[in-house]
Structures are given as structure tokens and as C-alpha cells.
Image (tube, rainbow, N blue to C red):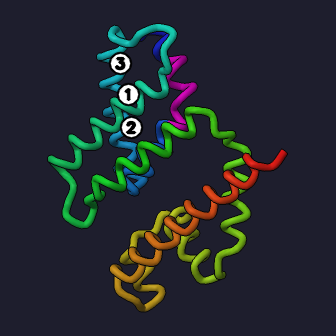
Amino acid sequence: MDADFVKRLMEHRSRLHAFVYALVRDPHLAEDVLQEVAAVLFGKFATFVPGSDFGAWAREVAYREILSVRRSEWRARRHLDPALAREIWSAFERRREGVEPAARREALRRCLGGLADGVRRVLDWRYAAGLSSAEIAARLRRTTQAVDAMVYRTKRALADCVRRRMAGEAGTP
């Protein structure tokens, strides 16, 4: 195996995994997709232009692989709205273009701190514990649609909060 490829893949693996997980929202599927992406990347590594952004190239390959998986294998409840997929793609690209990750994490931490305890608990169950909407719904005695709507609205609110905080810090001398 090409040592340069392995080195580059290992340097970008955690960010690539985060990108894939953000799009598929299932830890097991994310690992499967990531392995497929690694195989595709290795097969196409000869086409990689040295000096260009390996991470951006890898995300592009991953994005196309996810769309392929989505078309062929995902069940209806796992479908990701194409507009949301593009939004996630754009967010990763904006981050790559110079947004300070530490500042973004701090803004997110502060925004998360402003959430109601119940909402924060749902996010912890979903993302830290990896529970499905159905599992969370059973715990809360609500419908999966209600849980999905809560998570969706909360993610939107957090994204807006982080954007406001980042814009406020960028304008501060």
C-alpha cells in the first residue's frame, strides 16, 4: 500500500468520519461507508493532484459514495434531504476555508449551554449514546416524528446560534 496515501488518509480520517456521519447519521453505516470510501480513494489515488487539498478531495469522493449508497440501499426512514446534504457539504467547505475550529467549538459549547435540560438530554442520547429516534421516542413517550422534529429544530437553532456568535467575534477588534 502506498505510504503517502496511508499518511494522508490517517491525517484526515477523523474529519472525514465526521463528515460521513453528519450525512448518514448512523454510526455503523458511517463506518461501512468510510471503509468503502477508503477503498475508492485508494483506487483513485493516482488521480489525486499533489499539492491540492486531500481532505476536500476525500470529502468529494465520500459525498458521491454516500449518494450512491443512498440511492441503492437506504430505507425510507434513513433518507437525507438533498438540500440538507448540500448544507452539510457547504458547512464543511466553509470550515475548510478558514473558520477557526477552536472558536467554532467554543461558540457551539456556549450555544449548547443555553439549551433546556430536556433538549440537551435528547441530543446527548442521539449523538453521544447513538440512540435512534425510536429509542428516544420510547423513553419520552412521544412519536419518532416528534423526536426527529425536535432534533431538527434544535440543530437549526444551534447552527444559527453558532453563526451569530462567530459573526459577532469576527466583528470584534
Could you tell me if the residues under marks 2 and 1 are in contact, i.e. CB atoms within 8 Å? yes
Residue 133 image point, x, y percent = 39, 74
Q: What's the magenta region?
A: 6-15
Image quarter in which the C terminus is found:
top right
User: What amino acid is labelled 2 in the image?
Assistant: Leu
* Category of crowding for the residue at label 1, using alpha-carbon neighbours closer than 10 angstroms: few (below 14), some (14–19), many (at least 20): some
| Res. 26 image quadrant | bottom left
User: Under tag 2, what secondary structure?
Assistant: helix
**Camera-nearest residue between 57 and 44:** 57
In the rendered view, does 52 fall on the left or right side of 47? right
**Camera-nearest residue between 17 and 60:** 60
Q: Main secondary structure of the magenta part?
A: helix
**Camera-nearest residue between 8 and 28:** 8
User: Under tag 3, what secondary structure?
Assistant: helix
Residue under the point 55% across and 69% down: 157
With respect to residue 19, does 25 lie above or below? below
What residue does disc 1 label? 38
| Res. 101 image quadrant | top right
Could you tell me if the residues under marks 3 and 1 are in contact, i.e. CB atoms within 8 Å? yes
Residue 85 image point, x, y percent = 35, 50
User: What amino acid is labelled 3 in the image?
Assistant: Phe
User: Under tag 1, what secondary structure?
Assistant: helix
* Category of crowding for the residue at label 3, using alpha-carbon neighbours closer than 10 angstroms: few (below 14), some (14–19), many (at least 20): some
Residue under the point 22% across and 49% down: 70
Q: Which of disc 3 and disc 2 is earlier in sequence? A: 2
Q: Is residue 34 in the magenta section?
A: no
What residue does disc 2 label? 34
In the rendered view, does 32 fall on the left or right side of 4? left
Q: Name, please, the residue furthest toward the left.
A: 72
